[in-house]
């Protein structure tokens, strides 16, 4: 059953992954063909970086950034393929949850669900417009130079990739295959993560609404409703655990590579004097800052919303209930005091505070590199 592919919450992102064979029933051959060009390009990038390490340090910084970007894309590819079944189970759970809220939740929560769906669809469109603009710029980039240039600089041992006919072949391969593959792997993963975080924020609001709707009824009904809320909270915690499992390694690579990439791009900007190199460097800095910034913003909202559950539990008429109800309230409040955080690599919580820390560290390394270069 693939009903989750038509869930409006995720727009076309899940359909893209299904069509590519990254999730759902797929053949290994399809996945190998999809990864072949990025992997061979990646190997060529590594050899090129090794060969040009002692050349112009500014261009080396740009090459290092492009290598890191492809590394991140490949990490996402292998993560999705490796966790195929977990991704499908997670999406099926969201699909059932979404339909249950539509049918059984408070009208205000249903309205918020519709707003969240509209918001995530707009977010998907903005993301695709942004990355398509970047893709068009990458197509133009090689033709801004008099010498032969690739979108991603590559070098191979047994032949010169910049000699005819190899140059024409690899340039067309990068334009026709590499850039589209990068777009359809990198962006849907980001959109699915952001949408899941936004949905997590919504179900926490639903949780608080359920607690607020517990009124002064008979003690048996009051206790039953509160136990249902505890079960609902446990389900939300499981949602957080599943999402963290699926994106934790990617988050670790994103933080590590983003810090290095931002540092290298800033250093690259301080050295270049040509407009052809200046514009892509600014575009890359803007793109990466946007992706990690908005991811940490949504994760931070999810974490802060989870803290409101304790206040909603305290506001219930627990003081009129029996000792068992009061004990349940204590359990709920104690559990909610620890925010539900998504951690990168299981170590670094995705919060705006940590995003600012990453920016500070990157700038510190940039200042250090700039100091060394001036000496």
Image: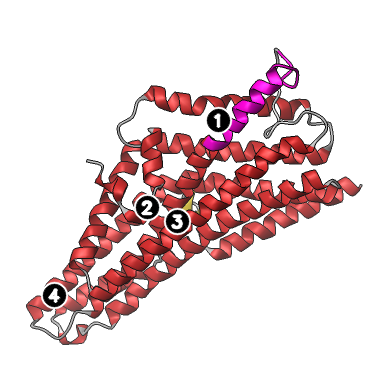
Mark 4 vs mark 3: in front: 3
User: Of the residues under marks 2 and 4, which one precedes in the sequence?
Assistant: 2
Separation of marks 2 and 1 at Cα, in angstroms: 25 Å
Mark 3 vs mark 2: in front: 2
Separation of marks 2 and 4 at Cα, in angstroms: 36 Å
Residue 83 seen in the figure:
no
Q: Residue at x 57, y 31 (%)?
A: 176
Separation of marks 3 and 2 at Cα, in angstroms: 10 Å
The stretch in magenta equals 159-180
Q: Is residue 305 left or right of residue 99?
A: right
User: Of the residues under marks 2 and 1, which one precedes in the sequence?
Assistant: 2
Report which quarter residue 85 is drawn in.
top left
According to the picture, the residue beneath numbered tag 2 turns out to be 10
Residue 158 pos. (x, y %): 70, 12
Colour scheme employed for the rendering of this structure: secondary structure
User: Given the current orientation, which residue lies at the most extreme top position?
Assistant: 158
Q: Which mark is residue 223?
A: 4
Q: Which structural element holds mark 1?
A: helix
């Amino acid at each position: 059953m693939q009903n989750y592919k038509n869930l409006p919450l995720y727009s076309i992102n899940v359909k893209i992954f299904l069509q590519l064979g990254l999730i759902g029933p797929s053949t290994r051959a399809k996945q190998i063909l999809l990864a072949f060009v990025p992997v061979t390009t990646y190997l060529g990038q590594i050899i090129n970086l090794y060969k040009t390490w002692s050349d112009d340090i500014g261009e080396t910084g740009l090459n290092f950034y492009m290598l890191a970007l492809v590394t991140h894309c490949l990490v996402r590819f292998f993560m999705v393929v490796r966790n195929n079944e977990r991704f499908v189970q997670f999406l099926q759970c969201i699909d059932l949850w979404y339909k249950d809220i539509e049918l059984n939740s408070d009208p205000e929560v249903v309205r918020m669900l519709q707003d969240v769906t509209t918001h995530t669809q707009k977010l998907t469109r903005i993301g695709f417009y942004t990355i398509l603009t970047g893709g068009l710029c990458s197509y133009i980039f090689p033709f801004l130079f008099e010498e032969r240039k690739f979108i991603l600089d590559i070098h191979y041992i047994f032949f010169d990739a910049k000699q005819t006919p190899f140059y024409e072949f690899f340039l067309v391969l990068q334009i026709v295959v590499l850039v589209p593959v990068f777009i359809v792997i990198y962006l849907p993963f980001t959109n699915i993560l952001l949408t899941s975080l936004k949905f997590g924020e919504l179900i926490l609001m639903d949780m608080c609404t359920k607690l607020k709707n517990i009124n002064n009824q008979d003690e048996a009904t009051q206790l039953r409703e509160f136990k249902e809320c505890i079960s609902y909270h446990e389900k939300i915690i499981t949602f957080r655990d599943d999402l963290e499992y699926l994106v934790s390694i990617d988050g670790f690579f994103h933080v590590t590579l983003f810090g290095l990439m931002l540092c290298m791009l800033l250093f690259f900007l301080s050295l270049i004097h040509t407009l052809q190199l200046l514009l892509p460097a600014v575009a890359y800095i803007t793109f990466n800052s946007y992706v990690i910034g908005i991811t940490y913003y949504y994760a931070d909202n999810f974490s802060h919303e989870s803290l409101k559950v304790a206040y909603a539990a305290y506001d219930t008429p627990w003081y009129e209930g029996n000792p068992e109800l009061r004990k349940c309230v204590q359990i709920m409040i104690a559990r909610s005091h620890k925010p539900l955080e998504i951690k990168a690599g299981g170590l670094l919580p995705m919060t705006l505070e940590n995003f600012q820390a990453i920016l500070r560290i990157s700038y510190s390394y940039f200042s250090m590199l700039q100091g060394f270069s001036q000496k």
